Image (cartoon, helix red, strand yellow):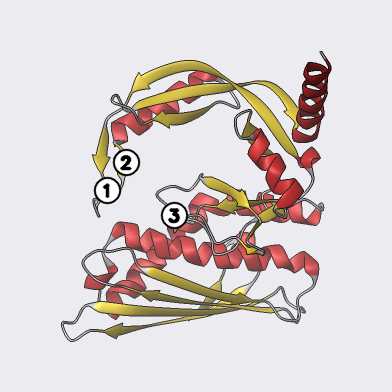
Amino acid sequence: MEKEMPSYCHGCKYVGECSGKHSATGGLRRLTISIEGLGPEGSSCIRSSKVVVDFPGDRADPNIHVESSAPNCDKSFDVQNRIHKEIILRIIYKILNDMPVVEMEDDTFREKLAEAEAAVARDFISKLQHAAANQNAGGGMMGERLQCSVQNAPKFLEWIRGRGGVAVWRSINLSNPGASWSTPAMTDGKPTCKPTWQAGSEPERVITDANEIDVVEAREVKRFHVAVRRSDNGLMLKVTDGGSRRIRRECEKAGEGSWYEFDYGDYNNAVIYVPGDTVTLAKWASERDTSKSRTETQ
């Protein structure tokens, strides 16, 4: 099949193909999706992604492997290749969330692929356009500054000074699209593995300058109980739809920059925070070292 990609791809076209390998019982056990894309007219840039999904059965989490490349591309096209890879993963997770793929026949999957593709394009088009704009302006992927709490500041500083920097990982799970995780860039002299199956196969960026991280003192504004339920596979606790709606309402009331965290104690509380004082990690470290020196000389 060949068709125009949504506008975040800037006029690219792609040719896609999917094939499935079935077990003796008829359930889909391996799914392969191959997509090749050409850059805008006149460009020699070709990018391709191959996604292989293995299903262990019994509704266990699938194993997803992605290969993505963009030969003959200049640096400005790199962000589109990364977006291409990310959007394929988001499509896969959209399908997995909507229907157990182990029960699909190939024709059914193609229909779900088209539906998920359209949904992903609608949900993420503005974010992807923003990412491309930041890349052209010299910023990193998604472009925002990383923030950390006062409690995590010593750890982040240690990672910058002795572990190769702070690696930032974005969620590719459509059920948890806004999540991100931070890890040291290196572990035992090797690149750190992704912290969770929900993260992309590679970090979005690695921060090595303490001036590029903000230390934010959180100020609690509200705490309340939310109902939770077990995920479909029974391995996770998830907030109910009603609880999620209340969290969104309370964050809107708290104002711009607010966020929530969960206090998984006996009460399953959601805690709404707003940012307090903010300084760069470099300044925080300098003030801490100065305070420590004064204490030692007294």
Q: Please, what secondary structure does the residue beneath circle 2 have?
A: strand
User: Which residue is the site of mark 2?
Assistant: 238
The mark found on residue 173 in the picture is 3
Dot 2 amino acid type: Lys
Dot 1 amino acid type: Ser
Separation (CA) of disc 3 from disc 1:
14 Å
State whether residue 152 appears in this view: yes
Q: Please, what secondary structure does the residue beneath circle 3 have?
A: loop
Q: Quadrant of the C terminus?
A: top right
User: Which residue is the site of mark 1?
Assistant: 231
Q: Residues within 10 Å of mark 1 (few under 14, many from 20)?
A: few
Q: Nearer the viewer, residue 252 or 219?
A: 219
Q: Residues within 10 Å of mark 3 (few under 14, many from 20)?
A: many
State whether residue 10 appears in this view: no
In contact (CB < 8 Å): disc 1 and disc 2: yes
Judge whether 151 appears above or below 198 on screen.
Answer: above
Q: Residues within 10 Å of mark 2 (few under 14, many from 20)?
A: some
Separation (CA) of disc 1 from disc 2:
6 Å
> Which quarter of the figure has residue 79?
bottom right
Q: Nearer the viewer, residue 89 or 150?
A: 150
Q: Nearer the viewer, residue 276 or 295?
A: 295
Q: Is residue 202 left or right of residue 60?
A: right
Q: Answer with mark 3 or mark 1, whichever residue precedes in sequence.
A: 3
Separation (CA) of disc 2 from disc 3:
14 Å
Judge whether 74 appears above or below 278 on screen.
Answer: below
Dot 3 amino acid type: Asn
Residue sitting at 48 percent across and 48 percent down?
177
Give how far across and how far down residue 254 sits, in percent: 52, 19
